[in-house]
Image (cartoon, rainbow, N blue to C red):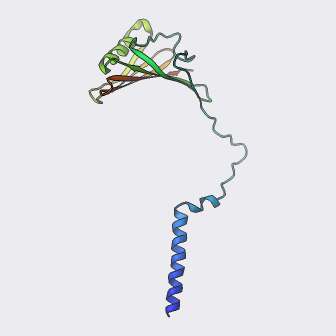
Amino acid sequence: MKLAIQLILIFALVVGVGFLFKSSGVFVAFHTPTPVTSGVQPTPINRIMTVAAGDDLSGFPGSIELPLPASATIIKQYQATTPTGTVQVTKMLESSKSLDENISYFRNLFKDPKLGWKLISEIGPTTTPNHAALFASSAGGIMTVNLNYTPTAKKTVIDLSFVINK
């Protein structure tokens, strides 16, 4: 009787440990993946290029005027292209001006009819302290301006992202 109970306990222990290993993913290495059926193409990868801060981005609005604030310094630039040809160009700036001063600067730019922008929407610091966003459109695409103010550093980081219409 004692031997039967010991055998049952050993069996239960082996089954329990096996269940724990299986549910924890240890046996994943022994799993054979399902082969890809022929004719199915893998998803193409987006191409992202980092551009030196002093260089011009080829996709940033050239025919559309967007003067950058004199108080701002470009700290990073990126240009991404999807396999379908959509281009997103991003400039990250750092400004010594306050959040409100930078919001006013971009709001005035987007409302100036000579520059060709139309202000679509604005999310202000009244709903999100130290953060604001403006969205504008032009004949060439959509511009998103995200502004984040850091009170301790007394700087505003401005993220300009432009998606070009095809």
x and y, in percent, of residue 74 in the image: 46, 19
x and y, in percent, of residue 91 in the image: 48, 21
Q: Quadrant of residue 133?
A: top left
**Which residue appears farthest toward the right when viewing the image?**
38
- The quarter in which the C terminus is drawn is top right
Query: Considering depth in this image, is 59 or 112 the residue closer to the camera?
Result: 59
Q: How many marks?
A: 0
Q: Is residue 128 left or right of residue 119?
A: left
x and y, in percent, of residue 5 in the image: 49, 88
Q: Is residue 8 above or below residue 118?
A: below
Q: Is residue 135 above or below residue 110?
A: below
Q: Is residue 73 above or below residue 13?
A: above
**Which residue appears farthest toward the front when viewing the image?**
153
* Residue at image location 35% in from the left, 14% down from the top: 105
* Residue at image location 40% in from the left, 13% down from the top: 69
Query: Considering depth in this image, is 65 or 151 the residue closer to the camera?
Result: 151
**Which residue appears farthest toward the left when viewing the image?**
126
x and y, in percent, of residue 36 in the image: 69, 48
* Residue at image location 45% in from the left, 12% down from the top: 66
**Which residue appears farthest toward the bottom when viewing the image?**
1
